[in-house]
Image (cartoon, rainbow, N blue to C red):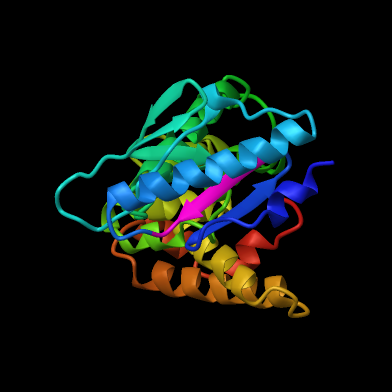
Amino acid sequence: MYNGVLTLKLPRGVEIVGFADDIVITVLGETPEEVEMLVTEAIDRIENWMQGVKLQIAHHKTEVLLVNNCKVLQRAEITAGEHVIVSKRALKQLGVMIDDRLNFNNHVDYACERATKAINALSRNMPNNAGPCSSKRRLLASVSSSILRYGGPVWATALETQLNRAKLSSTFRLMAMRVASVYRTVSSDAVCIIAGMIPIGIILVEDNECYKRKGTRGIRKTMRADSMAKLQHDWDSSKKGSWTHRLIPVLSTWVNRRHG
């Protein structure tokens, strides 16, 4: 009933992609005026098709993002039904924040905010002087790490910025502290080692490489070994947590221990 909208003949430079009941139209134009014209024509064709099968577009949920690399902020306005929609600086699509510069800084802020809320909620069940054992704490910690990792290959370019890496690491550190039951004065390097958790920066690189080489047999196991080697190298060369390094020099022995 719905697939026909994805095969409509649209103006040149316009493409349509769908997921469930969401539709995204991508338009390539040299000026905002050209983009507005093409979008309006595409929406009219889609709307006519929808009416033919007794479906409707939710105009009030329609959003516009004008992606460009101009120094001067550009805006676009389109008309959908009786609604005039002004372009935004960022919008959320399938859980990923996409901004008008495609640097995904907004998504890092969004993911860190959501993960922090999850950490604060879970922290009530993980006090430092009581609560579940470390293995159960790591299981609970996977909730926040999954939020930070969601859609990683899409916004992997954001990791090129030191500020974004610092934000992700700072958020991840909060949960690692709860897993390890440590004070806030413990360094970020040491707390991840004690908790037996690979830092989020290394995990996101691993996820991205696995996505690029998806379909390769055993790729996750191979990349996890590379991640552990990278973590061991960083741990050996770290200037922080020297006392912890004396206690836990070999990470594989510590992380893969069965008990105690």
Q: Nearer the viewer, residue 134 or 209?
A: 209
Residue 147, visible in the rendered structure? no
What segment is highlighted magenta in the picture? 21-28
Q: Residue at x 36, y 56 (%)?
A: 241
**Residue 135, placed above or below residue 249:** above
Q: Residue at x 42, y 38 (%)?
A: 64
Locate residue 101, reporting x and y percent. Answer: 31, 53
Give left or right: position of 108 versus 57.
Answer: left
Residue 106, visible in the rendered structure? yes
Q: Nearer the viewer, residue 130 or 202?
A: 202
Q: Residue furthest right?
A: 1
Residue 26 located within the stretch drawn in magenta = yes
Magenta segment's dominant SS is strand
- Considering the image in quadrants, where does the N terminus appear? top right
Locate residue 167, reporting x and y percent. Answer: 35, 45
Give left or right: position of 175 versus 126.
Answer: left
Locate residue 48, reporting x and y percent. Answer: 66, 37
**Residue 88, placed above or below residue 67:** above
Q: How many marks?
A: 0
Q: Residue furthest left?
A: 72
Give left or right: position of 93 versus 157.
Answer: right
Q: Residue at x 55, y 26 (%)?
A: 59
**Residue 124, placed above or below residue 4:** above
Q: Residue at x 31, y 58 (%)?
A: 240
Locate residue 192, reporting x and y percent. Answer: 49, 52
**Residue 24, placed above or below residue 153:** above
Residue 223 located within the stretch drawn in magenta = no
